[in-house]
Image (cartoon, rainbow, N blue to C red):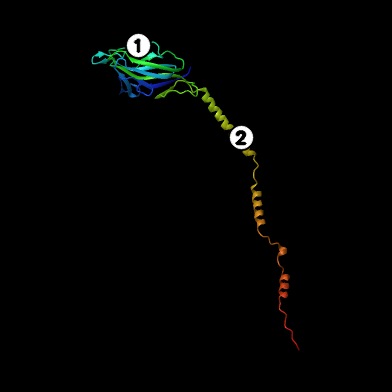
Amino acid sequence: MPSKTLIIDGAETSQIRYSTGWSFLPGNDNEYLHTVSHTTTQGAQFTFGFNGTSVIVYGSLSVRDEGFATLPNTSYVLDGGLPVLFHGNPSANDDHRYQQVFYSSPPLPYGSHSLVGTCVDEGGKVWIDYLVVEVPDNLPANTTVSKSHALHARSAPPIAEILCGVLGGLLFFTATLAFYLWYRRCPMIDTKSLASGTQSTEAADEPSLAPSSMPTRNDVLVCAESHKSPMPQRYV
């Protein structure tokens, strides 16, 4: 089944609950996010709750310290089951060994799980670097996946996302084509007719002076004659 890998830093106290006896120190370039969780207290524990199908604990080995070997003897209990012990693998050639698998769970049904790690030996230096959780790639939309500093996809993009993208593109193309055809079929406006109609309207609004209503020359003369004063008569 396609899956995703969630990496949780060991110093992420919002997701990993630590008991007393732990300290959080700067790591080096070989440790994830340059941080590390550390304890030498027997019985010190951490509890990690997760939703996934497997979990792996990675840590660092401090093989030699002041001339003698210190092994990170730890135990791990998954979902209240039997403890699984880890004793480390010392090497006379290396002072430190990084990104070592302290615990790896068997395949689990997807759901809520809990892992408890415990320091078994007093004085044994335990360095927890990070944890890895596998989750299915095709989770339901309403599923909440715990936060992590890194999310690495190990499969191709889901088919559903590809189909949604293709269908969205086809829908946009269809809508654009329909709008274009509708625009081409709309009746075009005759700009000449519109211009002539405007001129006619403007002409109709102006007062018209018909030739028949203009006064003629005879009318002017008659009007002038009618306004002449009568000439005085001469009496003999």
Q: x, y (%) of residue 38?
A: 31, 19
**Tag 2 secondary structure:** helix
Q: Mark 1 packing: few (<14 Cα in 10 Å), some, or many (20+)?
A: some
Residue projecting furthest to the bottom = 236
**Tag 1 secondary structure:** strand
Residue at mark 2: 178
Point 59% across, 33% down: residue:
175
Q: Label 1 amino acid?
A: Leu
Residue 202 sits above or below residue 186 on the image = below
Q: Quadrant of the C terminus?
A: bottom right
- Residue 34 visible in the displayed image: yes
Instruction: Depth check: give the residue in front, 218 or 100.
Output: 100
Q: Is 148 on the left or on the right of 92, as rendered?
A: right
Q: Is 2 on the left or on the right of 187, as rendered?
A: left
Residue 203 sits above or below residue 21 on the image = below
Tell me how many marks there are. 2
Q: x, y (%) of residue 214?
A: 70, 65
Residue projecting furthest to the left = 66
Residue 112 sits above or below residue 192 on the image = above
Q: x, y (%) of residue 103?
A: 37, 14
Residue at mark 1: 85
Assess whether mark 1 and mark 2 are in contact (beta carbons under 8 angstroms). Answer: no
Instruction: Tell me which numbered mark, 2 or 1, is placed earlier along the sequence.
Output: 1
Q: Is 172 on the left or on the right of 208, as rendered?
A: left
Point 57% across, 32% down: residue:
173
The span from disc 2 to disc 1 (Cα, nearest Å) is 69 Å
Instruction: Depth check: give the residue in front, 80 or 179.
Output: 80
Q: Mark 2 packing: few (<14 Cα in 10 Å), some, or many (20+)?
A: few
- Residue 98 visible in the displayed image: no
Q: Label 2 amino acid?
A: Ala
Instruction: Depth check: give the residue in front, 206 or 112.
Output: 112
